[in-house]
Amino acid sequence: MAVLMISRERAMILKRDPLGGWQSKGRRVMASVDVEKVDKFYGSTQVLFGVEVGIEDGEFVVLVGPSGCGKSTLLRMIAGLEEISAGQIQIGGRVVNNVPPKDRDIAMVFQNYALYPHMTVQNNMAFSLKLAKAPKDEIKKRVDRAAQILGLEPYLERYPRQLSGGQRQRVAMGRAIVRDPQVFLFDEPLSNLDAKLRVQMRTEIKELHQRLKTTSVYVTHDQIEAMTMADRIVVMHDGVVEQNGAPLELYDRPANLFVAGFIGSPAMNFIDATIKRNGGGPLAVTADGTELPLAADAGGQDGQAVVYGIRPEHLDLADDRVGASAEVSVVEPTGAETLVFSRLAGQEISTVFRERHQFTPGQKIHLAPNLDTVHLFDKSTGQRL
């Protein structure tokens, strides 16, 4: 069936795939997702404020932020499960504000798997194709392909109750894969899994994306998931996008205090200080007079109140001539590294050492920052200087 969309000329070469995909001469139409100045209200309460996110075809983008930041709401708006109060969303160049979910050519993987308990794995994955009245041989081909990709071939005749949590999540992904959608949407799919299985499933989802190259939008509150899986991260807070960029870009150059504190584990250390320029090298001076060094080209004005940010792995042990004094409070060995909590200038900081030092609570140590990795933020606005 020919479908008019965007232009008459383009409509002539587009045909509706009976199983849900838009195809043109055997190739999938580009599946970018564009969120343009989107607002969301629940009654008089606004939860999204002019959100703008552009997702390129084949990109894996992670929406990350604390609970209540609006990331799941935005995902549900892309899926068509929530109405858009203002702005527009485009999928593959088509405005979908008023398009029902079933016609958006998306597939969603939920946190709670949402499997049919009375159906086998094979029937769970085939169900949407049967509803679309797809030919039996096409259904079998797609289910077999998904089972092979996900390692589910030995489990096709089992029921969900006979599977582990990781296997159930793979079935949920398989059900999405067989639809061959333009866009995959993942709503915190690993939240119900134990820590070891989450690590395994992270790798499997990333490998799956590398194989299929389907545009994917993934929601999580876990910044480790975001850092390890994403091509690009969108950090959200209180309904706005705080920063949007590649994982290491956000890690190395956070735009503000929120992003700096949210991205990275253990979190970045923040120390309140004032910039001092006295003809020599600039310093950040704390309330008790502790002097923390800054790079010669550090931003900020003399006397400006700032927050001095340094990541735990960027502090090194030093002697008392070049390091700032700190008192050890807690030591947490993990095997590969040792996490040390201490008090510096009256404020608690954390430090990560790969060497196996024998620290004891109450011990005095001296720490020196790597000046190339120091971050300065304006105290009043929280913005990076």
Image (cartoon, grey):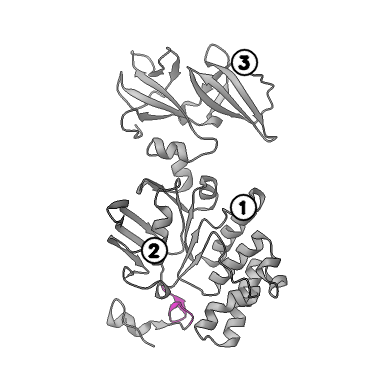
- Could you give the CA–CA distance between mark 2 and mark 1, rounded to whole angstroms? 25 Å
Q: Secondary structure at mark 3?
A: loop
Q: Which residue is mark 3?
A: 362
Q: Which residue is mark 1?
A: 198
First in sequence: mark 3 or mark 2? 2
Q: Secondary structure at mark 1?
A: helix
- Residue 143 location, x and y as percent? 61, 77
Residue 253, visible in the rendered structure: no
Residue sitting at 68 percent across and 61 percent down? Answer: 164
**Residue 313 in the figure: left or right of residue 150:** left
* Kind of residue at badge 3: Gly
* Kind of residue at badge 2: Ile
Rendered-image quadrant of the N terminus: bottom left
Q: Check residue 78 in the rendering and tell me which mark sits there, or answer none.
A: 2
* Residue at the far front in the pictured view: 43
- Could you give the CA–CA distance between mark 1 and mark 3, rounded to whole angstroms? 37 Å
- Residue 336 location, x and y as percent? 68, 36
Residue sitting at 40 percent across and 83 percent down? Answer: 15
Crowd around label 3: few <14 · some 14–19 · many ≥20 (10 Å)? few
Residue sitting at 37 percent across and 69 percent down? Answer: 92
Residue range highlighted in magenta: 19-29
Between 155 and 42, the one lying in front of the other is 42
- Could you give the CA–CA distance between mark 3 and mark 2, rounded to whole angstroms? 53 Å
Determine which quarter of the picture holds residue 211.
bottom right
**228 over 20 or under it: above or below:** above
Crowd around label 1: few <14 · some 14–19 · many ≥20 (10 Å)? some
* Kind of residue at badge 1: Arg
First in sequence: mark 1 or mark 3? 1
Residue 344, visible in the rendered structure: yes
**326 over 240 or under it: above or below:** above
